[in-house]
Image (cartoon, rainbow, N blue to C red):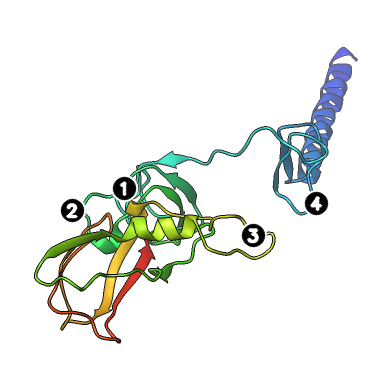
Amino acid sequence: MKLANFKQKRCVWTIFRMLLLLGIFSFTQTIPAQVTIGSGEPFHEKALLDLKEHADGTASKGLILPRVSLLSSSDYFGITDHMKGTIVYNTNTSDSSVPIENRVSAGFYYNNGSRWEKLYLGYTNWFYMPSIVFDTSSTGLQSAKNIYQLYINQFKTPKLVSPGAPPSIPYLPLATDLYYYITDYDEDVFEIVSLTDEGILTYKVKQAASDYSLIDIVFVLK
């Protein structure tokens, strides 16, 4: 009789454990895959991850993405392969030994599955240098212009703005965030000596300019 009671109790315990495990498994399958971090507030219905500090949506803290030091756009920064959709903040600027098409600079980058591409937040990819004056009254002398600084001066102090617009043009990159190009110029009037990574243009005036003399300068965000 005692042996029968023991077997009966063991069978009941086994069934209980199976029901308990089944209940836990069923519960975990119904737990939402959406999470709120930062408060006990419920997540937004369209968010997988909702960073929320207060119920009214206000916050005193931000999201800090992983900070990495990329050597180039093909760098894995310690992982073994590119993962499409990865977003990081890069703290490094490539040196001149890196091919120009693979150089990186400080800023947000996303991975397209084969390389890192910079997120141009609020920037256009390229734009023309605003109009500037070159004095061609004296010939034969070598002169230099900081075309980056001339661009910044104009964009920070526009002559007129539309109602409600900021007093200066926003989203101004640093000199080292740009590539500089001379796409065309009057070769009868100018001799281009050099153009540096910081936007210093050195030139000579061969003869006085005509009514149609020009230098076309284009800036491209790295």
Categorize mark 2 by other alpha carbons within 10 Å: few (<14), some (14-19), many (20+): few
The quarter of the picture where residue 99 lies is bottom left
Q: Label 4, on which residue?
A: 45
Q: Amino acid at mark 3?
A: Ala
Instruction: Give the alpha-carbon distance from disc 3 to disc 4, as whole Å.
Output: 35 Å
The quarter of the picture where residue 183 lies is bottom left
Residue 117 seen in the figure: no
Instruction: Give the alpha-carbon distance from disc 2 to disc 1, as whole Å.
Output: 12 Å
Mark before the other along the chain sequence, 4 or 1: 4
Mark before the other along the chain sequence, 3 or 2: 2
Residue furthest to the top: 2
Q: Amino acid at mark 1?
A: Thr
Residue furthest to the front: 137
**Cβ–Cβ under 8 Å for marks 3 and 1:** no
In the image, is residue 31 above or below residue 136? Answer: above
Instruction: Give the alpha-carbon distance from disc 3 to disc 2, as whole Å.
Output: 42 Å
Q: Residue 97 — which label?
A: 2
Q: Secondary structure at mark 1?
A: loop
